[in-house]
């Protein structure tokens, strides 16, 4: 399995390199026709997909530090794209939730992302696309579990 893991690692490094460049984010935002700082849109999308989210959990999901995410959520709140609410189980925790205006923006981003991904997968058949989605979801779940376990061990 060593060869396959090496191939997977190389593919992930290549993909990570592409995803961390500013150009794909800028292209997505332009195609969606929205006006949003590209540093904010990954937070907005995660709040819409997984919210309500506490700032600490959101920081962990984005790989950013708490204070940076807190400042960025404040910006999104100022734009009317997210709101903060008290967690119903723990009043000490403030959570970010998507607003109607934020949902309109994430819908536009989703439409643009779909156009880009459709062009990338134009030569693939439906089974291949489904299998890629299934396997990436499985791998991402394992990676998140590993990261959370490592975080709890180091705490």
Image (cartoon, rainbow, N blue to C red):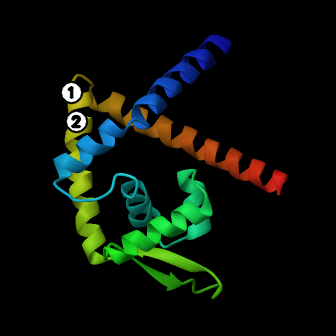
Tell me: 94 left or right of 98. Answer: right
Tell me: 53 left or right of 21. Answer: right
x then y, percent, for residue 47 = 43, 65
Q: Secondary structure at mark 1?
A: loop
Residue 122: image tag: 1
* Residue at the image point whose x is 54% and y is 61% from the top: 68
Question: Pointer 2: what residue?
Answer: 118
Give the vertical position of 108 relative to 9 (above or below): below
* Residue at the image point whose x is 31% and y is 73% from the top: 79
Q: Using the image as rendered, state which of residue 123 and residue 95 is in the foreground.
A: 95
* Residue at the image point whose x is 54% and y is 19% from the top: 10
Tags 1 and 2 touching, CB below 8 Å: yes
Q: Residue furthest top?
A: 3
Quarter of the figure with residue 65: bottom right
x then y, percent, for residue 128 = 35, 28
x then y, percent, for residue 57 = 60, 64
Residue 20: image tag: none
Alpha-carbon neighbours of circle 1 within 10 Å: few (<14), some, or many (≥20)? few
* Residue at the image point whose x is 28% and y is 68% from the top: 103
């Amino acid at each position: 399995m060593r060869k396959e893991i090496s191939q997977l690692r190389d593919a992930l490094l290549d993909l990570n390199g592409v995803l961390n460049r500013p150009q794909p984010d800028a292209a997505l935002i332009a195609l969606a026709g929205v006006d949003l700082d590209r540093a904010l849109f990954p937070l907005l999308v995660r709040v819409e997909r997984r919210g309500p989210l506490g700032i600490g959990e959101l920081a962990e999901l984005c790989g950013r530090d708490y204070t940076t995410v807190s400042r960025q959520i404040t910006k999104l709140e100022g734009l009317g794209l997210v709101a903060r609410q008290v967690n119903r189980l723990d009043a000490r925790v403030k959570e970010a939730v998507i607003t109607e205006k934020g949902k309109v923006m994430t819908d536009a981003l989703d439409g643009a992302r779909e156009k880009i991904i459709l062009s990338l997968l134009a030569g693939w058949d439906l089974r291949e696309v489904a299998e890629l989605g299934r396997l990436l979801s499985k791998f991402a779940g394992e990676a998140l579990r590993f990261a959370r376990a490592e975080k709890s061990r180091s705490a």
